[in-house]
Amino acid sequence: MAWSPRESDLIDEILLAAGKALYLANRFELKCKRVLHVAHLADIIRDDPVVALEQAVAQLPGEKKLYDTLAELIARSDTGVSQERAATLHKARKARNDIAHESAGAIGDLWSYEVRSKIDALRNLRPKVTDLASGDAIVSAWVARIESPGGDPFTLAPDYSEQAVNWVFAHVPSEWLDPAWTPDHRSPRTIREAVSYVPWYSRP
């Protein structure tokens, strides 16, 4: 018997968005850890300008959870994080956790006929990606400054966050993300209807 969920193409579209969102979530966490490691390394070298690189690296603290990493970054005076930006970063952290642990599974049983629940899962993903992208813009600017020391001040494109969100959902039909839109779909009610079921969505 072939392994083919009843709404294979619909599920593929949603999982593609969820996978892209998960990539952004993982990169956000890695960027935060990288920035903090560089900040710690700078502290060590400032306190001992002649320290060997191997010794400096050996003094670096171990990895922390994302919450603790962000808390330390926000508390540092050299990052200049305002209260507004701190709130943006913590919203991004919460979005990262939701995306990593819940978003893909929210589409439910792959064998289900429930199209509406799958569309709802996709819609619920979008604001989380928006929050994540807003925080990622802040951290990405820090990373860029680290990679270009002494260069011109780096500024992200004004629509960086919007571009990230569009990248995640660009393949999705726009109406799927519109809360006012309802899919024209009815689950089969009899065995005969189930046997002759035609998927609600087929990729063009």
Image: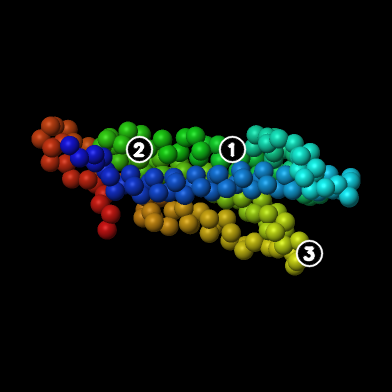
Q: Residue at x 29, y 48 (%)?
A: 9
In what element is the residue under mark 2?
helix
Q: Nearer the viewer, mark 1 or mark 2?
A: 1
Q: Quadrant of the N terminus?
A: top left
Label 1 crowd (10 A; few <14 / some 14-19 / many >=20): some
- Identify the secondary structure beneath mark 3: loop
Tell me the kind of residue under disc 2.
Ser
| 70 sits left or right of 20 in the view | right
Q: How many marks?
A: 3
User: Given contact means CB atoms under 8 Å apart, are the residues at marks 3 and 1 in contact?
Assistant: no
Outermost residue to the left: 192
**Residue underneath mark 2:** 117
State the separation of the CA atoms marked 1 and 2.
23 Å
Q: Amino acid at mark 3?
A: Gly
Q: Is residue 105 above or below residue 20?
A: above
What is the C-alpha distance between the residues marked 2 and 3? Answer: 51 Å
**Residue designated by label 3:** 150
Rendered location of residue 175, percent (x, y)? 37, 53
How many angstroms separate mark 3 from mark 1 (CA)? 33 Å
Toward the viewer: 186 or 94? Answer: 94
Task: Give the label, 2 or 3, closer to the camera.
Answer: 3
Furthest residue toward bottom? 152
Q: Residue at x 35, y 40 (%)?
A: 118
Q: Which quadrant does the C terminus fall into?
A: bottom left
Residue for point 31% across, 47% down? 10
Residues under numbered marks 1 and 2 in contact, where contact means CB atoms less than 8 Å apart = no
Name the residue beneath numbered marker 1.
94
